[in-house]
Image (tube, grey):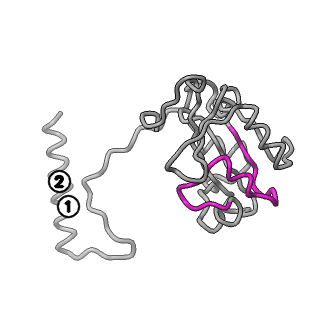
């Protein structure tokens, strides 16, 4: 996106945004529209913990929710869609970096164009929608990861075993057992030779 959207003149420092529309699969009435700076890492596990959502319970909203609550279709989620949530069912979470930038860039309900809006304009939408600080949260996503760019490293991946997988509940034939033993023996020999 950074390569295709360029602003110049008074809009040269415009911050580009990305959007997520999420809900709690266990408490389906809990929904969030997240607008984050394009360079911001949104750590989903940390976000779940912050929002008090059970582990693995944060989900991307389906098209029905998009249409009902934000008046948009899949692939077109954007900051301006919060204007369509007149029931205030969706909590708006906007990245502090977007509010602190002189201008932020969002798609205007269509991914074929982008618009720049001032930080004052961002906050004006909060006022126009009648949202309080619980329904419209200016959030520092870096706090989730412990600071700028800091994130918990991923655990090392386990090496794949050469052992053939057996379908759950399926018994191996005598021939398959024999082949399996031979493969394991060959694998051990190969490992010993490599050492």
Asked if the residues shown at circle 2 and circle 1 are in contact, with their CB atoms under 8 angstroms apart, the answer is yes
Q: Residue at x 60, y 45 (%)?
A: 44
* CA neighbours of label 1 inside 10 A, class few (<14), some (14 to 19), many (20+): few
Q: Residue 35 in the image: state x and y as whole percent.
A: 64, 42
What residue sits 61% from the left and 44% below the top?
A: 45
Image quadrant for the C terminus?
top left
| Along the viewing direction, whichever of 120 and 19 lies nearer the viewer | 120
Mark identifier at residue 141? none
Q: Is residue 118 magenta?
A: no
Q: Residues within 10 Å of mark 2 (few under 14, many from 20)?
A: few
Q: Position of residue 167 (x, y in %)?
A: 34, 71
Q: Nearer the viewer, residue 142 or 172?
A: 142
Percent x, y of residue 71: 67, 62
Q: Which mark is residue 185?
A: 2
Q: Secondary structure at mark 1?
A: helix
Extent of the magenta region: 71-94
Marking on residue 181: 1
Work out whether residue 174 or residue 116 is closer to the camera in this orientation and state it.
Answer: 116
Vertical position of residue 24 compared to residue 1: above or below: below
Q: Is residue 89 above or below residue 107?
A: below
């Amino acid at each position: 996106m950074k390569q295709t959207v360029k602003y110049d003149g008074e809009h040269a420092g415009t911050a580009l945004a990305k959007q997520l529309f999420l809900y709690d699969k266990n408490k389906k009435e809990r929904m969030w529209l997240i607008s984050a700076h394009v360079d911001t890492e949104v750590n989903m596990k940390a976000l779940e913990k912050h929002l008090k959502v059970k582990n693995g319970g944060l989900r991307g909203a389906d098209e029905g929710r998009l249409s009902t609550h934000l008046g948009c279709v899949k692939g077109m989620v954007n900051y301006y869609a919060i204007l369509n949530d007149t029931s205030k069912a969706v909590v708006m979470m906007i990245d502090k970096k977007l509010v602190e930038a002189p201008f932020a860039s969002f798609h205007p309900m269509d991914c074929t164009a982008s618009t720049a809006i001032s930080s004052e304009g961002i906050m004006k939408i909060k006022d126009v929608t009648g949202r309080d600080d619980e329904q419209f949260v200016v959030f520092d996503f870096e706090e989730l990861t412990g600071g700028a760019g800091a994130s918990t490293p991923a655990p090392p991946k386990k090496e794949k075993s050469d052992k053939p997988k057996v379908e759950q509940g399926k018994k191996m034939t005598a021939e398959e057992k024999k082949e399996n033993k031979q493969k394991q023996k060959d694998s051990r020999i190969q490992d010993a030779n490599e050492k």
